[in-house]
Image: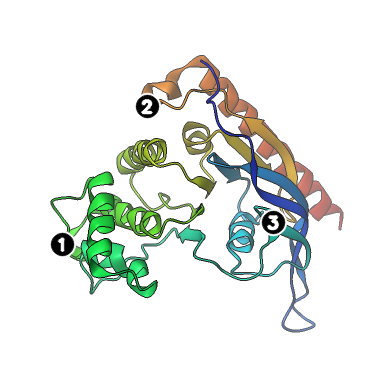
């Protein structure tokens, strides 16, 4: 299978990034979350960030979003340094972020209302994304009437509706059962193929990382550094049978070994100190 044909302009540059959480007291010292992190994310690709628990994956995503400020280094989007949050960088969190008092339509139009988009235009945009995520029969439903996977579709549609350049996803399918999770992975790829976005996707699931992305960025155990970036050699049109192929399983073992080696090295350092 041929690797997908994507534009190769760099969308996000992460350069010499350090993040240290300062201790609130002498008893609780500083914690180095990330150290000298460097990588690029190309325009219109899905790049996953993976690594052991506590390696700084979510911290890194929040830094790209502008929700946190790095201790040192910089993040550039289209050559401009990230300073603070922006509607051009939308975040899908692990926990549901839908408003329980709003319908599906109301949730998806929320960001557009904040931007002052006229109602006639909002209605057209919201209807388009309701159709795109397959919720056309549920636009008047409230979140309590939806399944977990459907609520995630609302989250994704709401982000797409404000037309960000970058979508940042923090383990968005982590709380779903395995069958719903696999359906949502396929749905994400379908939506991405229909309307391209640059997506950074944090996960701890190796198979998920390989299935949805074009490149996998592997972080070491804390403090997170980039151990390796792997190009995923599969076409854009993927179905679940891909997971049973020899090439997929070989890459899965390769990623697992890379993460396991990083964890072992971290444990040796911890035990020596």
The image quarter containing residue 39 is top right
In this view, the mark in front (1 or 3) = 3
- Quadrant that contains the C terminus: bottom right
Label 2 sits on a secondary structure element that is helix
In this view, the mark in front (1 or 2) = 1
> Residue visible at 78% across and 43% down?
265
Q: Nearer the viewer, residue 252 or 62?
A: 62
User: Distance between the Cα atoms at labels 1 and 3?
Assistant: 39 Å
User: Distance between the Cα atoms at labels 1 and 2?
Assistant: 30 Å
* Vertical placement of residue 74 versus 236, above or below: below
* Pointer 1 local density, CA inside 10 Å: few below 14, some 14–19, many at least 20: some
* Vertical placement of residue 177 versus 117, above or below: above
Residue linked to disc 2? 240
User: Which of disc 3 and disc 2 is earlier in sequence?
Assistant: 3
Q: Are marks 1 and 2 in contact (CB under 8 Å)?
A: no
Label 3 sits on a secondary structure element that is strand
Q: Which x, y percent locates residue 86? A: 54, 66
Q: Are marks 1 and 3 in contact (CB under 8 Å)?
A: no
User: Distance between the Cα atoms at labels 2 and 3?
Assistant: 35 Å
Residue linked to disc 3? 76
Residue 137 visible in the current orientation: yes
Residue 202 visible in the current orientation: no
Residue linked to disc 1? 141
* Pointer 2 local density, CA inside 10 Å: few below 14, some 14–19, many at least 20: few
User: In the image, is 113 to the left or to the right of 143?
Assistant: right
* Vertical placement of residue 131 versus 72, above or below: above
Of all residues shown, which one is farthest toward the right? 272
């Amino acid at each position: 299978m041929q690797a997908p044909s994507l534009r190769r302009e760099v969308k996000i540059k992460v350069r010499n990034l350090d993040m240290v959480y300062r201790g609130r007291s002498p008893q609780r010292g500083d914690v180095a979350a990330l150290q000298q992190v460097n990588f690029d994310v190309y325009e219109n690709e899905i790049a996953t960030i993976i690594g052991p628990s506590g390696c700084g994956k979510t911290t890194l995503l929040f830094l790209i979003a502008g929700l946190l400020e790095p201790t040192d280094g910089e993040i550039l989007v289209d050559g401009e340094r990230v300073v603070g949050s922006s509607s051009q960088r939308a975040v899908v969190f692990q926990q549901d972020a839908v408003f329980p008092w709003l319908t599906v339509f109301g949730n998806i139009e929320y960001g557009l209302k904040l931007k002052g988009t006229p109602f006639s235009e909002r209605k057209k945009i919201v209807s388009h994304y309701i159709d795109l995520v397959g919720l056309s029969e549920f636009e008047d439903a409230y979140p309590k009437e939806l399944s977990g996977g459907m609520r995630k579709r609302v989250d994704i549609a709401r982000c797409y509706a404000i037309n960000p350049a970058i979508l940042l996803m923090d383990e968005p399918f982590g709380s779903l059962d395995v069958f719903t999770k696999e359906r949502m992975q396929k749905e994400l790829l379908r939506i991405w193929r229909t309307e391209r976005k640059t997506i950074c996707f944090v996960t701890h699931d190796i198979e998920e990382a390989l299935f949805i992305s074009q490149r996998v960025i592997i972080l070491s155990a804390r403090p997170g550094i980039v151990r390796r970036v792997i190009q995923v050699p599969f076409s854009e049109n993927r179905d679940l049978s891909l997971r049973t192929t020899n090439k997929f399983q070989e890459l899965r073992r390769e990623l697992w070994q890379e993460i396991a080696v990083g964890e072992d090295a971290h444990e040796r350092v911890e035990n020596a100190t």
